[in-house]
Amino acid sequence: MAERDSVPLSESHTEMTEMLLPNDTNNLGRALGGVVLHWMDICGAISAMRFANQQCVTASMDHVDFIAPIDLGEIAVIQSYVFNTGRTSIDVKVDVHSENPRTGKHQETTTSFLTFVAIDDTGKPVQVPDLACETEAEEDLREMAVEQRQDELESIIERME
């Protein structure tokens, strides 16, 4: 496979939708946290693989707070994009919001940052392209994700002290 020097942030944008059905709910009729994490992992992995043109595996998921529920029958919208890279790693921001199809109401439910590692056919890590921001809007999106992740990490450290 030909190596690419850089890839635009826009090539990593991914959006998934899932309707919350009974098998994915708790006894209150709300999304199970593990189901939401599963959706986030899949969406993030797709962004990473689109970016790297390689198989990617999950290395880590940052702290996750569930700030609002997703209720039975609502639509979960999961969006992700690459915001940073290392030599073999790819950092992805994943946002989830709920959408009530009857009222049109949208609500932010959770956000997290996931790190993936690109691997070859033997499972060994491989180098990934650099991230290119081709527009000011892409650069702003990248900077916002970097700052949000830093703020979240600092908040976690403060809680541990």
Image (spheres, helix red, strand yellow):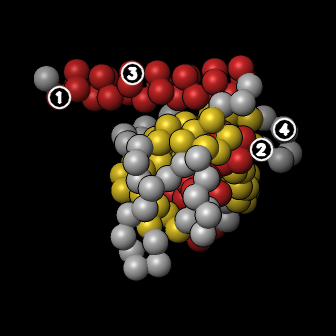
Residue indicated by mark 2: 100
Residue indicated by mark 4: 104
Per the model, the C-alpha gap separating discs 1 and 4 is 39 Å
Per the model, the C-alpha gap separating discs 1 and 3 is 14 Å
Q: Secondary structure at mark 2?
A: loop
The x, y position of residue 105, in whole percent, is: 78, 35
The x, y position of residue 88, in whole percent, is: 41, 53
Residue toward you, 105 or 111: 111
Residue indicated by mark 3: 151
How dense is the environment of label 1, judged by Cα within 10 Å: few (below 14), some, or many (20 and up)?
A: few
Which sits earlier in the primary sequence, circle 4 or circle 3?
Answer: 4
Q: Secondary structure at mark 3?
A: helix
Look at the numbered discs 4 and 2 and tell me whether their residues touch, using CB distance below 8 Å. Answer: yes
Q: Secondary structure at mark 1?
A: helix
How dense is the environment of label 3, judged by Cα within 10 Å: few (below 14), some, or many (20 and up)?
A: few
Looking at the image, which residue is at 36% across and 70% down? 124
* Residue 160, label in figure: 1
Looking at the image, which residue is at 58% across and 58% down? 3
Which sits earlier in the primary sequence, circle 1 or circle 3?
Answer: 3
